[in-house]
Amino acid sequence: MASRDFFKLTAGLKGKFVDRKAIQRAIAKSKKRPLVRWGALTRKIARQSIRKRKKSASPGKPPSSHSSEPNLRTIFFAWDFETETVPVGPIVTGSRITPKLPGVIQEGGVTRTRIGLRRGKSRVVETKVKPHPFMGPAMEKSQATAPDLFKDSIGP
């Protein structure tokens, strides 16, 4: 008899405790939405900072875009399920010769360029690139609105 009463008591108490999995799901959902919005805002600011024009940008300013898509304005963001982060940045459109061009433009450095010569021959030339930051300033600019994006994200 006593064991039956104990079972009724534990079954009744179970409903009184907090459901941890439900809370963890709610927190994960409330964390994802503002981070994705922040990634979208950072992408928008970065894309708008890259002007499409014939003239080159001065060092220290965001780069200019001289060609049609895909180019530096092809910036993506995505939710990473494993790390629960939102990486934002340009896609790597380089070839075997210029594999990391967006990073070189962002931070400066040396890149290789293939120059076509006559009769189907070409050669590779190294070029120094001065830094043209565009992702860092976009991130800094978007950080001003980050508190507003996270405001009331978990709920009352």
Image (cartoon, helix red, strand yellow):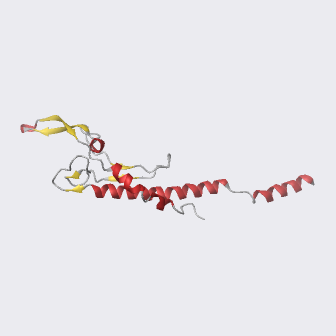
Residue 91 x, y percent position in the rendering: 32, 48
Q: What is the residue that sits farthest to the right in this orientation?
A: 1
Residue 2 x, y percent position in the rendering: 92, 53
Residue 82 is left or right of residue 143, and the answer is: right
Residue 136 is left or right of residue 155, and the answer is: left
Q: What is the residue that sits farthest to the bottom in this orientation?
A: 156
Q: Quadrant of residue 92?
A: top left
Q: In which quarter of the image is residue 98?
A: top left
Residue 120 is left or right of residue 37, and the answer is: left
Residue 95 x, y percent position in the rendering: 25, 41
Q: Which residue is drawn at 29% across and 40% down?
A: 100
Q: Residue at x 30, y 56 (%)?
A: 47
> Which quadrant: the C terminus?
bottom right
Q: Residue at x 23, y 46 (%)?
A: 59
- Give the total number of marks visible in the rendering: 0
Q: 42 or 141, which lies in front?
A: 141
Residue 17 x, y percent position in the rendering: 73, 57
> Which quadrant: the N terminus?
bottom right
Q: Which residue is drawn at 30% across and 47% down?
A: 133
Q: What is the residue that sits farthest to the left in this orientation?
A: 118
